[in-house]
Amino acid sequence: MPRSADRPERTVRIEQLPGEEVAVTAGDRRFVVAAACPHRKGRMAYAHVNPVTLRITCPLHRSTYDLATGCRVSGPATGELPVRAEP
Ligand code: FES
């Protein structure tokens, strides 16, 4: 289900794609990330996205990843979140 912030440039949308990917749109940026968190398979379709910092937080144990790189920023995960930027 799409979620929006109060300002259009900060709109966040998360969509489950066919297969094991999730599309994340934050303002005018779009990323495709793995549908399952690398920690314990939390469903990233239910993640929280900060459209200002471009960080995504897993709903299960709250590991946070940089959307641009997939690098873990905080939380119990030790791996990176597979991510790619869409044009
Ligand atoms: S499953 Fe995502 S942080 Fe644990």
Image: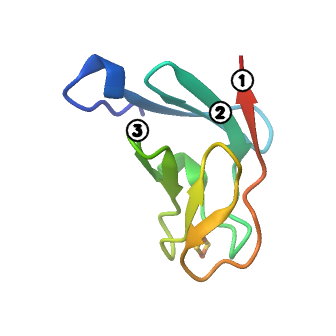
Marks 2 and 3, how far apart at CA = 12 Å
Marks 1 and 3, how far apart at CA = 16 Å
Instruction: Identify residue for label 1.
Output: 86
Closest to the observer, 20 or 86: 86
Q: Please tell me which of labels 2 and 1 falls first in the chain.
A: 2
- Residue 9 lies left or right of residue 37; in this view the side is left
Q: Are marks 2 and 1 in contact (CB under 8 Å)?
A: yes
**Up-down relation of residue 79 to residue 4 (above or below):** below
Amino acid of disc 1: Glu
* Secondary structure of residue under mark 3: loop
Ligand 1 placement by image quarter: bottom right
Marks 2 and 1, how far apart at CA = 5 Å
Q: Are marks 1 and 3 in contact (CB under 8 Å)?
A: no
Snapshot quadrant of residue 11: top left
Picture coordinates of residue 6, whole percent (x, y): 19, 28
Q: Residues within 10 Å of mark 2 (few under 14, many from 20)?
A: some
Residue at 23% from the left image edge and 23% from the top image edge: 7
Residue at 72% from the left image edge and 31% from the top image edge: 85
- On-image quarter of the N terminus: top left
Amino acid of disc 3: Pro
Residue at 70% from the left image edge and 44% from the top image edge: 33
Residue 31's disc number: 2
**Up-down relation of residue 26 to residue 83 (above or below):** above
Q: Please tell me which of labels 1 and 3 falls first in the chain.
A: 3
Amino acid of disc 2: Phe
Instruction: Identify residue for label 3.
Output: 51
Closest to the observer, 71 or 82: 71
Residue 77's disc number: none
- Residue 10 lies left or right of residue 83; in this view the side is left
Residue at 26% from the left image edge and 32% from the top image edge: 5
